[in-house]
Amino acid sequence: MYIIIMGGGRVGLSLANLLIDDGEDIVLIESDETLCAEVAAELDALVICGNGTNSKLLEEVDIEDADYFIATTGSDEANLLSCILVRKYNVPHIIARVSNPDHEEAFKEVGIEQVISPERAAAAQLQKVVTRPNAAELMTLGEGDAEILDMTITNDKVIGKKFKDISPTKDYIIISTYQNGKLVIPQSDNIVSRGEKVSVLVKRGTFKKVSKRLGDGS
């Protein structure tokens, strides 16, 4: 894919490096000359020093051929303006970073549906670290209706039982376990061991109940 990123700050640079590692074709646009030079020295991609809200510059980087345009600067106003401008080139996917959640509606009103707030995402992740210290989130399904979590079984009430006796329930289903570091689909007659790491599909709103059932039981 051909992806144009506007903004060479921490978010834009990190995103560009990840996409390059995935083999994607990246162009990064940065307006600050000093930052542009720093990014160009670090990034294995074409870095353009200029304003992403300039139609001529966008056309010079073949905006018409882009699969994605991603605005990642720290300025919501610049991100919004660039996304409005890019829309006329019929780029299939336009994504904008929004620092102030109050501005999300403005993006959606002009047709930019994919709006990401790294600050909000980081806060949500920190909240989960605090409230779910014994579980790691792997994936969210649907509209947040369920999650797949990694958990460790430590509750004496389930240790020694067969998997069919503890899963599935109306709240969760154990979908995999790990033996010698390898993922294994648990069979109904397999015995649950203390400290066994499992991946669990958990229904929304039932995490505390599932954690109590599989974790320390408190």
Image (cartoon, rainbow, N blue to C red):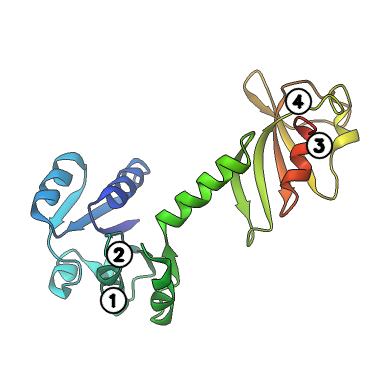
Classify mark 3: helix, strand or loop.
helix
Q: Which residue is drawn at 33% across and 76% down?
A: 90
Crowding near pointer 3: few (<14 within 10 Å), some, many (20+)?
some
Image location of residue 1, percent across then percent down: 35, 56
N-terminal label among 4 and 3: 4
Q: Which residue is drawn at 65% across and 18% down?
A: 180
**Which tag, 2 or 3, sits closer to the chain's start?**
2
Report the label total: 4
Q: Which of the two discs, 1 and 3, labels the residue nearer the N terminus?
A: 1
The residue located at (17%, 75%) in the rendering is 55
Q: Which amino acid does label 1 sit on?
A: Tyr
- Which label's residue is closer to the chain start, 2 or 4? 2
Does the residue at mark 2 contact the one at mark 3 (Cβ under 8 Å)? no
Q: From the image, tell me which residue sits under label 3.
A: 213
Element at badge 1?
Answer: loop
Q: Name the residue under label 4.
A: 154
Q: Which mark is residue 89?
A: 1
